[in-house]
Amino acid sequence: MRQLDAGHRPLGVDEPGDPGQRLDVFVAPDAEVAVGDPPVCGDGTVTAPEQCDPPGSLTCPSGVACAADCTCPPPPEDATAPAIPCESKTAHVAYILMAERNDTNGDSHNNGKYTMYLTVNQPAQGGPNAIKPGENLNPVKTLRMRYDAWRKLQPASFK
């Protein structure tokens, strides 16, 4: 092995697939590697090593709030399922609206008198449209669940 300078130390590593051969790897203990901007906890973007972002959001797979350091708490030791699971969350809110010809429009998409208007928001926002236990923190999945339930309540002539 050859040492590059006093600041580097050699580390012998067995090379995979070639037993008995050694690959010399030199480690520079004080080296800095710039690979881009470091992750910023709280910017709303999950960037490794973050597990969730922003803190306080219910984006962890365990269905609990994201910690202040953008990590998710471990799942319960008793292996119980979370009250509100989260699968592949890609949005914070979701809605679907269906209007018939004679429905009354409002001044916005969300305050008219429509045949169907379903909306989903995060539990922290509260209100009647907030995600509840048994639903999913992914609002698109919850919207689909609510739509399917709405369809089952419609008369056969409507389908």
Image: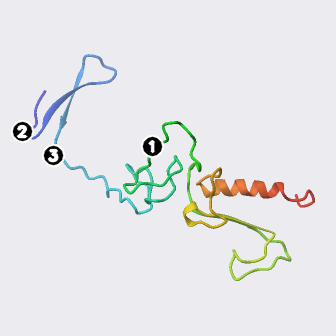
How many angstroms separate mark 2 from mark 1 (CA)?
A: 43 Å
Of pointers 3 and 2, the one earlier in the residue sequence: 2
**Amino acid tagged 3:** Asp
Residue type at mark 1 is: Pro
Q: Which residue is mark 1?
A: 74
Report how far apart the C-alphas of labels 3 and 2 lie in the structure: 12 Å
Quadrant in which the N terminus appears:
top left
Where 90 sits versus 3, above or below? below
Residue position marked by numbered label 3 in the rendering? 30
Helix, strand or loop under label 1:
loop
**In the image: residue 155, left or right of residue 104:** right
Residue in the picture at 58% in, 61% down: 122
Against 57, is 113 above or below? below
Based on the displayed image, in which of its 4 quarters is residue 117 positioned?
bottom right
Q: Classify mark 3: helix, strand or loop.
A: loop
Q: Amino acid at mark 2?
A: Ala
Q: Earlier in the sequence, mark 2 or mark 1?
A: 2
* Residue 34 image offset from top left, x and y in percent: 26, 53
From this view, report whether residue 33 is shown above or below residue 27. Answer: below
| Nearer the camera: disc 3 or disc 2 | 3
Whichever of callouts 3 and 1 sits on the residue coming sooner in the sequence is 3
Foreground mark, 3 or 1, reads 1
Q: Position of residue 28 (x, y in %)?
A: 16, 41
* Residue 84 position in % (x across, y down): 59, 50
Q: What is the residue that sits farthest to the right in this orientation?
A: 157
The dot on residue 6 is 2
Q: Position of residue 152 (x, y in %)?
A: 83, 54
Whole-angstrom CA distance, mark 3 to mark 1, is: 33 Å
Residue 135, numbered circle: none
